Image: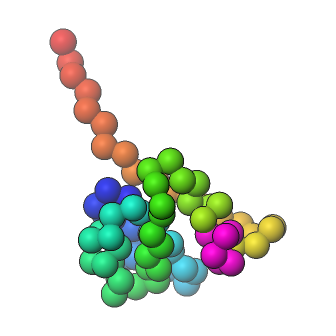
Amino acid sequence: AKTGATARAISRLRPNVPVYLCATNADVLRRHQLFFALHPLKLEGEGVDASAALKKKGLLAAGDKVVVVKAEATLSTIA
């Protein structure tokens, strides 16, 4: 998560399941501690698999259903 905007948008829907915001930026995580259903989780590096990190913390188990959402900014140029 670069800014956490996608996690905030999901939080506005008031989900009845936990939403894990996985990011390397401590400031992004700190700013999202009080949003509904959001649980910030610090990742150790850019290429770290979020679901593996959640399993390591005991937040996911084998057989759990998970939806992974990742937003990326893209730039396109029209020539």
Residue farthest along the left direction in this orientation: 79
Q: Position of residue 78 (x, y in %)?
A: 20, 18
Residue 9 visible at all: no
Boundaries of the magenta span: 54-59
Q: Position of residue 68 (x, y in %)?
A: 56, 58
- 61 sits left or right of 40 in the view: right
- 7 sits left or right of 43 in the view: left
- Give the camera-side residue of 58 and 17: 58
With respect to residue 70, does 53 lie above or below?
below
Residue at x 48% of width, y 61% of height: 44
Residue 55: in magenta span: yes
Q: Position of residue 39 (x, y in %)?
A: 47, 79
- 28 sits left or right of 77 in the view: right
Query: Colour scheme used in the picture?
Result: rainbow
- Give the camera-side residue of 23 and 13: 23
Residue at x 62% of width, y 69% of height: 54
With respect to residue 64, does 3 lie above or below?
above
With respect to residue 24, does 57 lie above or below?
below
Quadrant where the C terminus is found in the figure = top left
